[in-house]
């Protein structure tokens, strides 16, 4: 395999991987044990690493060992998906979790009664086998903590929008000006190769004929539905009420999935 090589010192600019404008060097940092350069796009404000030639090493394990928040985040994300479906009046539609990792979110959503499937080219799914996305149309694609990993965000978004008209994503927006140090650069795993501003996500949404609704921090919805920013923020803040809003309209799939996965199992009736 031909891997791109490190940049020569004093590179003046690099094409923005979101909009193609000339991005300018803004910070030097680390990825694994490497010294790397970051570039900021003056047009869409995206902040990207130099061409990430280290990803083969960075993905030795798809889920990085320092991710101690994985379970707490999935519990919160499941509530936020429920709330989003309720807001979009789409509780009965299929949710496809893009880059679904171990399958934690899909299992939680199915327990809540959502027809959730997963799709992940890189990670072995442990908890939601049998619920792979096989091309069926969905109502919502979720992409939690995925966009900052994408080398070509526009192409990835296009794939998601081919599955469903709405995309719920989380990625922490990078402060302005670009901070010298920030935990979300992820130097220890080297997997965060692109960091977003609201303007970047707005451009991506607009390019696909959609609008962006954002909390201005980490949760963003790309949609063609008129969702007010105020309602979006309220929903995120009150996400612990999601089960209360939705329980009358949903039936848990925990038991029916068990029966489907256990030939010969007897329904407890
Ligand atoms: Zn750009």
Image (tube, helix red, strand yellow):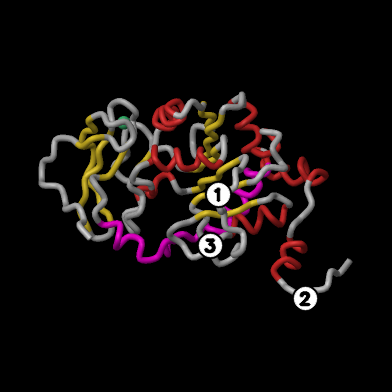
Q: Earlier in the sequence, mark 1 or mark 3?
A: 3
Label 3 residue SS: loop
Marks 2 and 1 sit apart, C-alpha to C-alpha, by: 29 Å
Q: Is the residue indicated by label 1 positioned so its CB lies within 8 Å of ligand 1?
A: no
Residue at the spot of label 2: 264
Relative to 80, is 122 above or below?
below
Marks 1 and 3 sit apart, C-alpha to C-alpha, by: 20 Å
Task: Please say whether residue 22 is one of the residues in the magenta stretch.
Answer: no
Tell whether 212 sits left or right of 42. Answer: right
Foreground: 164 or 74? 164
Tell whether 221 sits left or right of 159. Answer: right
Q: Earlier in the sequence, mark 2 or mark 3?
A: 3
Are the residues at dot 1 and dot 3 in contact (C-beta closer than 8 Å)?
no
Relative to 17, is 207 above or below?
above
Label 1 residue SS: loop
Tell whether 29 sits left or right of 92. Answer: left
Q: What is the x, y in percent for residue 62?
A: 42, 61
Crowd class of label 2 (few under 14; some 14 to 19; many from 20; radius 10 Å): few
Q: Is the residue indicated by label 2 positioned so its CB lies within 8 Å of ligand 1?
A: no
> For the view shown, which residue lies furthest in the bottom direction?
264
Which residue is rendered at x = 51% and y = 27% of the image?
210
Q: What is the x, y in percent for residue 155?
A: 39, 40
Residue 39, which numbered label?
none
Residue at the spot of label 3: 102
Q: What is the x, y in percent for residue 245?
A: 77, 40
Residue 135, which numbered label?
1
Marks 2 and 3 sit apart, C-alpha to C-alpha, by: 27 Å
Q: What is the x, y in percent for residue 266?
A: 83, 73
Give the magenta-colored segment's residue range: 54-82
Q: Earlier in the sequence, mark 2 or mark 1?
A: 1
Q: Where on the picture, by quarter, is residue 258?
A: bottom right
Q: Quadrant of ligand 1?
A: top left
């Amino acid at each position: 395999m031909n891997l791109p090589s490190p940049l020569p010192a004093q590179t003046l600019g690099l094409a923005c991987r979101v909009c193609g404008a000339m991005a300018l060097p803004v910070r030097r940092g680390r990825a694994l044990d490497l010294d790397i350069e970051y570039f900021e796009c003056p047009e869409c404000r995206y902040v990207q690493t130099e061409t990430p030639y280290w990803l083969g090493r960075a993905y030795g394990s798809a889920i990085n060992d320092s991710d101690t928040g994985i379970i707490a985040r999935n519990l919160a994300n499941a509530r936020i998906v429920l709330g989003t479906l309720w807001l979009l009046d789409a509780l009965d539609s299929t949710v496809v979790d893009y880059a679904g990792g171990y399958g934690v979110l899909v299992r939680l959503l199915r327990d809540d009664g959502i027809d959730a499937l997963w799709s992940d080219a890189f990670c072995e799914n442990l908890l939601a086998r049998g619920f792979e996305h096989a091309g069926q149309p969905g109502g919502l694609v979720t992409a939690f903590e995925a966009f900052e990993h994408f080398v070509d965000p526009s192409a990835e978004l296009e794939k998601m929008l081919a599955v469903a008209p709405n995309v719920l994503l989380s990625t922490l927006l990078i402060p302005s000006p670009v901070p010298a140090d920030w935990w979300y650069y992820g130097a220890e795993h080297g997997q965060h190769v692109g960091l977003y501003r609201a303007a970047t996500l707005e451009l991506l949404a607009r390019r696909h004929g959609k609008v962006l609704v954002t909390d201005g921090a980490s949760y963003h919805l790309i949609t063609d539905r008129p969702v007010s920013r105020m309602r979006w923020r309220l929903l995120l803040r009150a996400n612990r009420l999601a089960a209360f809003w939705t329980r009358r309209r949903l039936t848990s799939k925990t038991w029916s999935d068990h029966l489907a996965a256990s030939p010969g199992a007897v329904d407890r009736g």
